Every structure is written in structure tokens, then in C-alpha cells.
Image: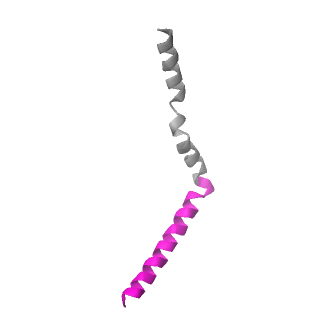
Amino acid sequence: MDINDIRAWQTTLLLISFIGIVIWAYSKRRKSQFDEAANLPFADEAQHQATIKKENKS
């Protein structure tokens, strides 16, 4: 076994890992969790708007 065999195995392993991650990321079971995570930056927006209104009244 020389360095080229190791490189071939490494390439194969990384390709299989990449395909696994792509399948995991685009699976329908994970869609709801990814949608929820995508909306996290906007989760506290209503609270922030209420704070701004309260400060403007004062």
C-alpha cells in the first residue's frame, strides 16, 4: 500500500461523506427543523418592536 492507495481511499471516503451530508441536508424529515432555524434571527423581533414603542412613549 503506497501513498496513492491512501489518497484513493481518502477521496472515496470524503465523497461518501459529502453525499451523506447532502442527503441529510435535503431530506424532508429535516425541513421543519431547518425552517425553524432559518427564522431564529427574527424570533425576538416582536419583543424588540414592543420595546421600541415603549421607549418612544416615554
Position of residue 49 measured from the top left corner of the image (x, y, whole percent): 53, 22
Q: Residue at x 47, y 14 (%)?
A: 55
Q: Give the range drawn in magenta.
A: 1-29
> Which residue is depicted at the point 52% across and 33% down?
43
Q: Is the magenta stretch mostly helix, strand or loop?
A: helix
Taking depth in this image into account, of 29 and 52 the one nearest to the observer is: 52
Residue 7: within the magenta? yes
Residue 15 lies, with reference to residue 55, above or below; the image says below
- 41 in the magenta segment: no
User: Image quadrant for the N terminus?
Assistant: bottom left
Q: In this view, does 6 lie to the left or right of 42?
A: left
Residue 29, given in percent of the width and then of the height, sits at: 60, 54
Q: Residue drawn 55% across and 44% down?
A: 38
Residue 34, image x, y percentages: 56, 48
* Figure check: 42 above or below 57: below
Direction from residue 14 to residue 3 in the image, left or right: left
Write the residue at 50% across / 19% down: 52
Residue 19, by quadrant, is bottom right
Q: From what the image shows, is residue 36 above or below residue 18?
A: above
State whether residue 35 is above or below residue 14: above
Residue 23 position by quadrant: bottom right
- Image location of residue 39, percent across then percent down: 55, 40
